[in-house]
Amino acid sequence: MGPHLILLGPPASGKGTQGRRLAESLGLSYLSTGALLREAVENGTPAGKEAEPILERGGYVSDELMGSIIEPWLEKNREGWVLDGFPRTIAQDDFLRGWLAGHSQRIDAVISLEVPKEDLIERIERRVECPDCRWSGQKSDLAGGGRCPKCGGEAGRRMDDSLENFLSRFDEFSLHTSPVIERYASVGGLTACDATAPVDTVAEGILKTVQRIITDGQTA
Ligand SMILES: [Zn+2]
């Protein structure tokens, strides 16, 4: 069985990118709660119907609803995974630990991506997205005339990247996810990674850290 890894970090810390890369490097399943929720909405499942209005106003779904969406995913993906965006709260962490204990599984490592708030705000202000092909990157990646480097579309600032939106998500993170990080720090399963460096450097650092943890057999 592959390792079970959790990636935590504030909004705009690069969790999604790093999570996907880590899962790919190690051949693990990758869970994005955002993608899983969107899928539930598109498929019109009962959970999806409940989640839709909450997602539309940019809110977070309840811990209970999240659990009901995550559980089938955990059942299906037993060979090791990287979780991104979950557990977001202590209640979600309780759910996850309970589920793992009931299935004789355990968390192998929790990685916390650390980026100072000022740097995150700077990232938000530089971030751009292409509405045509969904490419996203930074202003400096744009081709001539502010064009998308992938398809030549007219790339612009991401709709969900307003500063207010970020600040409210950051507050949510401080209030609800920081206690999860503190919990893993106190039980000894947490590895903090400086995520201010370029994406490739951060990815390399995370991979090395995880490989060392897996080899040493440390557990959370
Ligand atoms: Zn494009």
Image (spheres, rainbow, N blue to C red):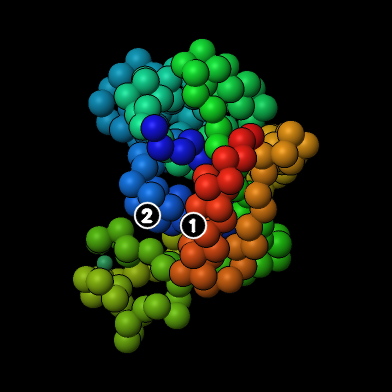
Asked whether the beta carbons under mark 2 and mark 1 sit within 8 Å of each other, the answer is yes
Q: In which quarter of the view is residue 148 placed?
A: bottom left
Instruction: Characterize the local packing of mark 2: few (<14), some (14-19) or many (20 or more) Cα atoms within 10 angstroms.
Output: few
Q: Residue at x 32, y 63 (%)?
A: 135
Residue 40 lies, in percent from the top left, at 33, 27
In the rendered image, is residue 1 in sight? yes
- Where is mark 1, residue-wise? 207
Residue 54 lies, in percent from the top left, at 48, 29
Please state which of residues 128 and 73 is positioned toward the viewer in this rendering: 73
Q: Quadrant of ligand 1?
A: bottom left
Tell me if 179 is positioned left or right of 26 in this view: right
Tell me if 115 is positioned left or right of 48 in this view: right
Please state which of residues 52 and 82 is positioned toward the viewer in this rendering: 82
Instruction: Characterize the local packing of mark 1: few (<14), some (14-19) or many (20 or more) Cα atoms within 10 angstroms.
Output: some
Q: In which quarter of the view is residue 134 placed?
A: bottom left
Residue 150 lies, in percent from the top left, at 25, 71
- Image quadrant for the C terminus? top right
Residue 186, label in figure:
none
- Where is mark 2, residue-wise? 25
| Outermost residue, right side | 186
Q: In which quarter of the view is residue 116 placed?
A: bottom right
> How many numbered badges does the structure rendering display?
2
Kind of element beneath mark 2: helix
| Outermost residue, left side | 151
Please state which of residues 208 and 206 is positioned toward the viewer in this rendering: 208
Looking at the image, is mark 2 or mark 1 earlier in the sequence? 2
Instruction: Give the amino acid at mark 2.
Output: Ser
For the residues marked 2 and 1, what is the alpha-carbon distance in whole angstroms?
8 Å
In the rendered image, is residue 48 in sight? no
